[in-house]
Amino acid sequence: MKGKIKTLKAVIALVLFVFLCITSAWAGGKITQDPAVSDLSQRIANLQNKCDVAKFQWYDIYQDGLIQGADDAAKMIIDARSALTAGNTQQAGALLDSAEKLLNTYEKGSLPEYVAPEPMKDPDNLGKIHLGTLADLKMLEFAGVPRWNYWFNFVGKGDDGEQYMAYACINHHGTGKVTLPILFAVSSTKNPNEVRQLNFNTLPVYTEGRDSITYTVKEGDRSLSYTLASGKVSIEYKDAYMTFKTNAVFKYSFWYDKGNDAAMMMPNAAMAGFEEMGAATAVFSFKNKTVRCKGFAEQENLFCGGPKSADYRSALLKYGNEWWVPFHSDQISGLFCMTGRYKDAGLYYNGKYYIPSEYRVTPLEGNKSFIIDAKFGSNDLHLIIDLWGWDAKLYEHWGNASGTVNGKAMTNGYSWLEHIPQGGVNNSPPPSNLKK
């Protein structure tokens, strides 16, 4: 009997010991985990992000090449996750080693070879760069290439603490005349996955003022007014639900290939035109609320397409890898452009226009954030783009800009991005692309 009591006491003591160990591990809401398992879990997360980077071509493919083994790497990551769940850390580690090797292998062999202009080759030569005039804005053809659009976008912070986006577009689609539809859309960080599309299918009325041109369109109780002047844009949208008004001021214009001529940015795809970035204010008036915003705006005047050139979007989808990144902050603003092998940029800093001598894109999170490091004059820019919304159909993204100029922090920074990968991935991914 005494032996049984001793055994029972020993069992009770063991149970208490295990309970105390578990309680200790749970203290503060923490559970002790095998370091090897924790390291492998982190590797899986890191490599999954690298797969997303590859899927969205979230880097300059003409500088680095394509990650051709991304599909196989994605399958290995899935298998590694299953192996880790089953407790087989050795197998999980081996699979991740193989996946990492594939995701660090870039190949340029499948990218088309062609000669593109090099506007950054001589950054001290500004060519024909100038602030866009009213005559420039009126052009329906430049260097033999018809107008593609007038496109305006706004990103800013409201006095309610939320961020807001709006864009508007008077389409020409390479015809040199207005073409339907007329675009307008809004979104906010209250619901970043929702973009309210408010397009028009009625041609606008065009009027010329002394110092401006205006496109006005009405459909029922909805209307849009789009006014352009040298260094200025004003837009007003109205419907039964909301009113949007914005004014933007531009101190400079970025011209593709320095405004010298139309440039073959991709095979059989001549493009030209100018972009303008600057500070902007906007007011969103809803039935029960008015929000006042401060931020940035960008006005695009793009010329491309036409009967003698490839369709703009078809060419981009075929050749990729478009990066079109306008941004603005209190300290610096500008635009970075990569289209196929074509690479261009313009920055406005301390009242002076610069063409960078070099820059590089470094991905952070696939389809979400990236870094651009640039040298311009004797200055250094470390630009961090973090996006909070996107229009998947049009490949448009919007968000914030931060970072440093010569080591000093940027403030009140906002950004836009149009990014079209080779083959496209948003609405009609090619069969070889990874599935999210």
Image (cartoon, rainbow, N blue to C red):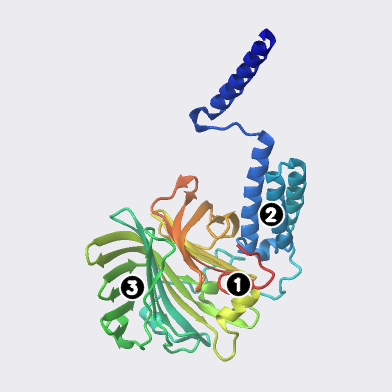
Q: Earlier in the sequence, mark 1 or mark 2?
A: 2
Q: Which residue is mark 1?
A: 424
Q: Within the image, what quadrant is residue 306 found in?
A: bottom right
| Residue situated in front as seen by the camera: 166 or 272 | 166
Q: Is residue 144 above or below residue 328?
A: below
Q: Which residue is mark 2?
A: 78
Helix, strand, or loop for circle 2?
Answer: helix
Any part of residue 351 in sight: yes
Q: Is residue 319 above or below residue 76?
A: below
| Residue situated in front as seen by the camera: 87 or 104 | 87
Any part of residue 262 in sight: no
Q: Separation of disc 3 and disc 1 at Cα?
A: 32 Å
Q: Which residue is mark 3?
A: 233
| Residue 367 at x, y percent in the picture | 55, 60
Identify which residue is drawn at 66% across, 45% down: 43
Task: In the displayed orientation, state which residue is furthest to the bottom.
Answer: 307
Q: For the residue carrying disc 1, how many other residues have a C-alpha within 10 Å: few (<14), some (14-19), or many (20+)?
A: many
| Residue 189 at x, y percent in the picture | 39, 58
For badge 3, the amino acid type reads Val
